[in-house]
Image (cartoon, rainbow, N blue to C red):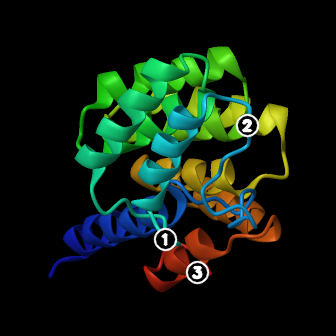
Amino acid sequence: MNTSLRKITGCLVLLSCIAAVSAGCGTAENPVSANPMGLSGIYVKEAETNYALARALWGNTEVCRDPKQAILYLDKTIELAPDYADAYMRRGLAKSDLRDWDSAFDDITVAIRLEPKPDYYAYRGLVSMRGGNSLGARKDFNRSLEIKSGQHRAWNFRGGLNILLHDYPAACADFKKGCSNGDCTGFESAKQNGYCD
């Protein structure tokens, strides 16, 4: 395998690792709680139950086992509680897994309008990156880090974007920041693929 093809293959493997570990329902900021059904009483019980059923499709991993089913549960959640920001964000991630970039972007945008959380910006940036919009992705990663500079997700996603754009020193710097903020997955993967020392 020639060097160029090996680098491209390594980049794809790296981005797959980052996306698999970083995208999904579980987050480092939201560990499995003592309330496994996630019923908080903030929203109608049926809406929260449907959200919990969707979230269960990710289990304790970051990969949704059935994005189509998750979308059905989240559609019902949103129908019952149209101001449920997490439901829009999760539905956006499920749609992203199905490569429905525009609809995924729109859902996460609604979540951001309801609650402008740094994770939401990071995930919308991931959707933009997956859909080929590197400029929009960078803007959202940067916005996420402006809100909360200590969150690993946007650092790692932006590192992946820099790999795609062949800016390896910037990628390594971002992965190191992600690692120093609690998630070394991107940095370790970049080292294994020869992008970082």
Along the line of sight, the residue nearer the viewer: 17 or 80? 80
The image shows residue 32, relative to residue 48, as above or below, that is below
Residue on which the image places disc 1 = 61
Can you tell which of label 2 and label 1 is closer to the viewer? 2
Can you tell which of label 2 and label 3 is closer to the viewer? 2
Along the line of sight, the residue nearer the viewer: 56 or 106? 56
Can you give x and y, in whole percent of width and height, for residue 47 in the image?
52, 33
Residue on which the image places disc 2 = 41
Q: Please report the residue visible at 30 percent of the width from the left and 30 percent of the height from the top.
A: 101
Mark 2 or mark 1: name the one nearer the start of the chain.
2
Q: Please report the residue visible at 77 percent of the width from the left and 52 percent of the height from the top.
A: 151
Can you give x and y, in whole percent of width and height, for residue 135 in the image?
48, 26
Where does the C terminus fall, quadrant-wise? bottom right
| Kind of residue indicated by mark 2 | Gly
Can you give x and y, in whole percent of width and height, for residue 140 in the image?
61, 29
Side (left or right) of 93 relative to 60 = left
Q: 10 Å neighbourhood of mark 1: few (<14), some, or many (≥20)? A: some
Calculate the distance from the C-alpha at mark 3 to the C-alpha at mark 1: 19 Å
Mark 2 or mark 3: name the one nearer the start of the chain.
2
Residue on which the image places disc 3 = 188
The image shows residue 63, relative to residue 67, as above or below, that is below
| Kind of residue indicated by mark 1 | Thr
Q: Please report the residue visible at 59 percent of the width from the left and 24 percent of the height from the top.
A: 111
Where does the N terminus fall, quadrant-wise? bottom left
Q: 10 Å neighbourhood of mark 3: few (<14), some, or many (≥20)? A: some
Could you say whether the residue bearing mark 1 is in a helix, strand or loop?
loop
Can you tell which of label 3 and label 1 is closer to the viewer? 1
Calculate the distance from the C-alpha at mark 2 to the C-alpha at mark 3: 40 Å
Q: 10 Å neighbourhood of mark 2: few (<14), some, or many (≥20)? A: few
Q: Is residue 87 visible?
A: yes
